[in-house]
Amino acid sequence: MRTFRGMPCKRRSRPKLAIDALDAVITAGQNAAGPHLERRVVKQLARMLHARVLFHRRDGEYLYREAQSVHTLSSWSMLQLARETQIRARKVRRRREFWRPEQRRPRGVLCFPIGPGVACIARGTPFGGRDVRAVRTVLRFLKRHQAVPETADVATQRTPPREKRPAFRGLIGSSKPWLRVLDSVWKVAPASCSVLLEGETGTGKELLARAIHLASKRARGPFIAVNCAAVNAETMHSELFGHIRGSFTGADRNRRGLVRQAHRGTLFLDEIGDMPGTMQVALLRALEQRAVRPIGSARERPADVRIVGATNRDLEALVESGEFREDLYHRVNVMTLRLPPLRERMDDLPELAQHVLGRIKPPRQIHVDALAVLARYDWPGNVRELDNVLQAAALLSQDDVLGPEIMDQVLASRRRITTAPTTRLAPRAESILRLLRRGWRSAPHVADRLGVSTRTVNREIRRLAQNGLVESSGEARARRYRAR
C-alpha cells in the first residue's frame, strides 16, 4: 500500500468532522493565543482530516512546513497556493516518475486563510465537500469566539468601510437615477459652495435642499426658504434684506430680512429664474460682499449664508436671452444637481406609494393591479401629483387595500392613461435636445458645448430626427439643426 509520508492512502471512516474538529480545536486553543493558537488549529484540523500540514504562512514567513513540500508540489505551485484567499480544495495529478515515498505527490490539497496568513494541508486522497464544510465551520466558530484574527477575503479586508449616511424623511427611492442624485448630495453637502437644483415641478427640490442643509456643517444654523415667484417685486428688497423702522410708509418696526435670518445657515431660493432683474443685482452684491444693507440703514450687516437655488426653467436659455444675469448664474451654479422626474424612476413607484399611504390615517395598502394602473400614467406633476392621487383614492375608498378601480376613477379626471410607456431619451440625447431648443445650432457647436465628438452628435441627431424631434436646414457644412 502506497503512502504519503507514512500516511495510508486508503480512505478511513470518519465521524462528523465539524463536531469533532470543534471539540479538538477548543481544547487545543484554551491556553494559546495569536500565532500559537493558529499553529495548533492548523495541526488539529490536519489531524482530524487525516492530512499533513504542507505549510502555514503568516506575514510572509512559513511557521510550519513539511520538508517534502517543494519536492512534491514544486515552487510554482507553492506560491500559487500561498495566495489563496478562500477555502479551496484541489486535486493533484500523479507523477509516476517519482517512486520514493517522500517524493510522491498527494492526491488532495486543501488551502484556507487563517489570520493574516494561509494554511495548506495535504493527504493521499482528494478532499470532498464535507471536509471543506468542516473547515469552514471551525474557522467561523473561531472568528466569533476565539482570539484568531478575521479570516475574510483579502479584497474584503482592503475595502474601506462604507460611509454611514443619514436618512432623511421624504427622500424615498432606490432606483439608479435617484441614488446618483443622493450620492451627489452627500458629496456636495460638506462644502459651503452654492448649489443649483434643476428639475420639473414636484420632483422634491425643497426636500433635497433641506437634506443638503442637514448634512452640511451649517446644520445647526437656520434653513430659510423663499419662493422668488410668489414675492412681490416691489417688496422683495425688504423681504430679502430687511428695513429700518420709518424708512418708508408702513415700516412701523425693524425687519431683519430673510438673508440675515439665514446667517450661518442656508438660504433656499425656490424658482430663482423668476427673480426680477433689480433684485438679481442686489443679491449678487450681497453674495460677493457677504453683507447686506437694509432699507434706510447707513451701514451693512454681516450675512454669511449658503445659497441653494431651485428652478424648473432652463437658466442657460434665460442667460442667453438676457432675462437672467450671467454673473449671478455663475455665482449660484457652482454645483448643479438635476432631479429626475417620476417617469424616469418608475422603479421607486411602489416604495413611494407605500410611504404616502403610510402617512394616511388609518394606513392603507395598495394592490398590485393598482400599481400597474399608476405605472401607465405619465405623471406630469411627479411625486407631488402622486401624493394627491393617493390621498384622493384613500378618501374615496372604504377598503383597506386600494384596488385598480378606484385608481381608474381618480385618474379619469386627470390626463389620460397612456397605453404605451413614454419614450425615454438617453442623457446625452436630452442634452443635445436642450441645446437645440434655444435655436438653430450646428453639430460642431453642439459637440463643443457637450465635450464630445462631432460624429457622436451627428449620430444622436440622426436618431432624434427619425423620431421627429429635430428639424434641419442647409446643406453639408452649413447645415443647422433645431428642436421641433
Image (cartoon, grey):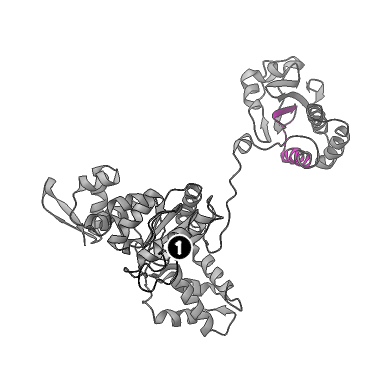
Q: Nearer the viewer, residue 353 or 295?
A: 295
User: In the rendering, at what x and y percent does residue 266 appear?
Assistant: 47, 56
Side of 461 where 232 appears, left or right: right
User: In the rendering, at what x and y percent does residue 404 appear?
Assistant: 49, 78
SS under mark 1 = loop
Side of 456 where 248 appears, left or right: right
User: In the rendering, at what x and y percent does residue 156 appear?
Assistant: 62, 38
Does the magenta segment cover residue 208?
Answer: no
Residue at 50% in and 60% down: 223
Side of 186 where 273 appears, left or right: left
Side of 50 where 112 appears, left or right: left
Tell me which amino acid carries mark 1: Arg
Does residue 345 appear in the picture of this structure? no
Q: Is residue 232 above or below residue 24?
A: below
Identify the residue position indicated by label 1 in the image: 256
Does residue 278 appear in the picture of this structure? yes
For the magenta stretch, what is the residue range? 116-141
Residue at 52% in and 70% down: 353
User: In the rendering, at what x and y percent does residue 163 appear?
Assistant: 58, 46
Q: Nearer the viewer, residue 483 or 211?
A: 211
Q: How many marks?
A: 1
Does the magenta segment cover residue 129?
Answer: yes
Q: Nearer the viewer, residue 317 or 274?
A: 274
> Dividing the image into 4 quarters, which one contains the N terminus?
top right
Q: Is residue 290 above or below residue 27?
A: below
Q: Is residue 184 above or below residue 339?
A: above
> Dividing the image into 4 quarters, which one contains the C terminus?
bottom left
Badge 1: residue crowd in 10 Å (few <14, some 14–19, many ≥20): some
Residue at 48% in and 60% down: 261
